[in-house]
Image (cartoon, rainbow, N blue to C red):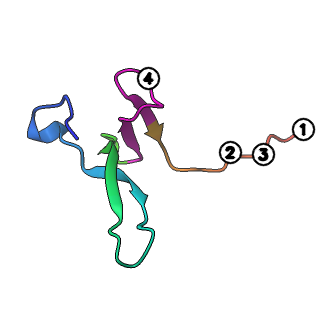
Amino acid sequence: MTTSPTTTKNLPTLKIYRVIKGRTNLDKDIWTPVAVCWPHKDGSGFNVKFKFNEAPANGGEYVMRPDTPKPAHSA
């Protein structure tokens, strides 16, 4: 999967694959790269850029952050 960043600093650190299992033990699994990930500068989460037909024309970009519970509001 090609990405637009060209400097080493901007290279993705992870890839996400769609894996289709082989029908039998003799068939190989098919691994298709569908996204790449970069860590946030603050080290808390990742930017993810998907590249597949269901996304917008140039791929879809999503942001992942830790799931931290919000404090309950007191009345």
Q: Residue at x 36, y 53 (%)?
A: 17
Q: Depth check: 14 or 17 in front?
A: 17
Mark before the other along the chain sequence, 1 or 4: 4
Q: CA distance from mark 2 to mark 4?
A: 31 Å
Q: Residue under circle 1?
A: 75
Return the x and y of residue 5 as percentages of the image width and height.
Answer: 17, 31
Q: Residues within 10 Å of mark 1 (few under 14, many from 20)?
A: few
Q: Residues within 10 Å of mark 2 (few under 14, many from 20)?
A: few
Mark 3 and mark 2 residues within 8 Å of each other at the beta carbon: yes
Foreground label between 1 and 4: 4
Q: Residues within 10 Å of mark 3 (few under 14, many from 20)?
A: few
Q: Residue under circle 2?
A: 70
Q: CA distance from mark 1 to mark 4?
A: 43 Å
Q: Which amino acid lies under the numbered mark 2 shown in the image of this protein?
A: Lys
Element on which disc 2 rests: loop
Element on which disc 3 rests: loop
